[in-house]
Amino acid sequence: MPKVTLHGALNELRGKLGNLVFRKLKDGTIVVSSAPPKKDRRQKKRAKEKRSPAQKAHNDQFAEAAAYGKAAQTHPVYVRLAAASLTMNAYNFAQKDWWEAPTIHRIEQIKGCIRVRATDNVLVTRVRVSVLDGEGRIVEAGEAIKRRGNWWEFATRAQGQAITAEAWDMPGHLTRVDLPLR
């Protein structure tokens, strides 16, 4: 990608000039792109009607992500991430967080303790652990406590046939992993 050094008044250029759009990023970089062609109301309506059900569902999801981003952009976690970033603002971080559910990487059972390693692109807010018997009934369940790094611990006295771990992130997405025991 070519790089151009601007001098004087051109250095503060932002907006649209002819068919070119100028955007200045937080790090001072100016991005120049061509503007999309104008569509009239009729063309927009036709394009919307031609969308497949999957495209319509994705558009609905994007609208939800945008609404979450707008509502959550003042949350201190997103504001702190934006302050450290040169290219993304708090709205971008909130919207990106909406798209990605947490991941449970590992479940370990150590004498009297169940450890769960869960991560998210921003923050895992809560982890719940359940110990199940052979018929799938809950023997013991509760909230895990955050420990060092991405590890969460749940103290247990129960012995079961399976463990279920659930992790939530800030937008409320849930990831669930069932681990059968020998």
Image (spheres, rainbow, N blue to C red):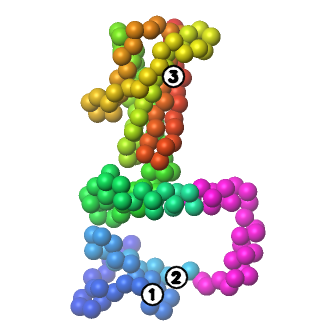
Query: Would you call the spot at circle 3 few (<14 residues within 10 Å), some (14-19), or many (20 or more)?
Result: some
Q: Are the two marked residues, 1 and 2, in contact with CB atoms closer than 8 angstroms?
A: yes
Question: Residue shown at 34%/27% (left/top)?
Answer: 145
Quick check: 38 above or below 121?
below
Question: Residue shown at 71%/72% (left/top)?
Answer: 47
| Callout 3: SS | strand
Mark whose residue sits in front, 1 or 3 = 3
Q: Inspect the magenta stretch and tell me whether residue 92 lies in it.
A: no
| Callout 1: SS | strand
Query: Would you call the spot at circle 1 few (<14 residues within 10 Å), some (14-19), or many (20 or more)?
Result: some
Quick check: 155 above or below 31?
above
CA separation, marks 1 and 2?
8 Å
- Which amino acid, mark 2? Ala
Question: Residue shown at 33%/33% (left/top)?
Answer: 150
x then y, percent, for residue 5: 27, 82
Q: Nearer the viewer, residue 82 or 86?
A: 82
Which residue was labeled with disc 2? Answer: 35
Which residue was labeled with disc 3? Answer: 164
x then y, percent, for residue 134: 59, 8
Which residue was labeled with disc 1? Answer: 16
The span shown in magenta is 37-62
Marked residue nearer the N-terminal end (1 or 3): 1
Marked residue nearer the N-terminal end (3 or 2): 2
Left or right: 93 in relation to 100: left
Mark whose residue sits in front, 3 or 2 = 3
CA separation, marks 1 and 3?
54 Å
Quick check: 146 above or below 71?
above
Quick check: 84 above or below 128?
below
x then y, percent, for residue 51: 72, 64
The part of the image, by quadrant, that contains residue 75 is bottom left
